[in-house]
Amino acid sequence: MKYHFDPIDFHMDDRAERYLDVFNDLLTQDNAMKGQINISYVNSTEHVVAWHKHEKQTDYWVCIKGSFKVGLSDGEKTDFVYLSDRDPEVLEIPPEIYHGYKALEPNSIMLYYLSEKYDPSDEHRAKAGDFGESWETENK
């Protein structure tokens, strides 16, 4: 039998635990890797992971456990949307849109596909609060 294991890059900080580039062996027809699949395990509901945007890369986010408040901004207008495992949907975030998130439940899990391999030079950051936004959630 022919099979093998590929290691998965793992990164952990005080905000989340992440599996990076999960299916690194998926190749395009010209034998080049296009994009990257990551998974974030977000243990804390206290941290805001924001803001950044890309010039080339499109992100596709899906919540596979728990829920997230997601911020989206073009620098002038800021919107918030919610992702939840109880209402599964994929959020497409095109280039030039600042984005970030805050877990609303401990141990929430986000799976995300990057249309390009991660390139730090394509990531442009801003700080939480730079767009006058509030990451607090309303009690219901």
Image: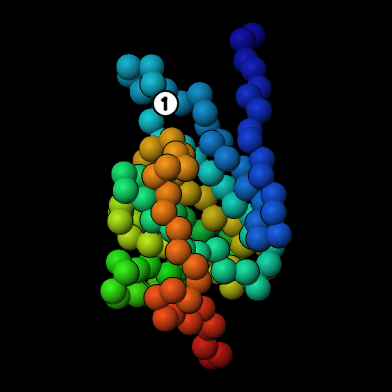
Residue at 37 percent across and 67 percent down: it is: 72
Is 125 rendered above or below residue 103? Answer: above
Confirm whether residue 86 shows in the render. no
Name the spot of residue 105 as percent of width and height, x first: 63, 71
Colour mode? rainbow
Residue positioned 28% across, 74% down in the render? 76
Question: Where does the image place residue 137, in percent across and percent down from the top left?
Answer: 53, 83
User: Image point 47% across, 42% down: which residue?
Assistant: 120
Q: Quadrant of residue 70?
A: bottom left
Circle 1 — which element? loop
Kindly identify the amino acid type of the residue bearing the numbered disc 1. Answer: Met
- On the picture, is 26 further left or further right than 16? left
How dense is the environment of label 1, judged by Cα within 10 Å: few (below 14), some, or many (20 and up)?
some
Q: Residue at the location (45% across, 58% down)?
A: 125
Q: State the quadrant of the N terminus.
A: top right
**Corner quadrant of residue 89:** bottom left
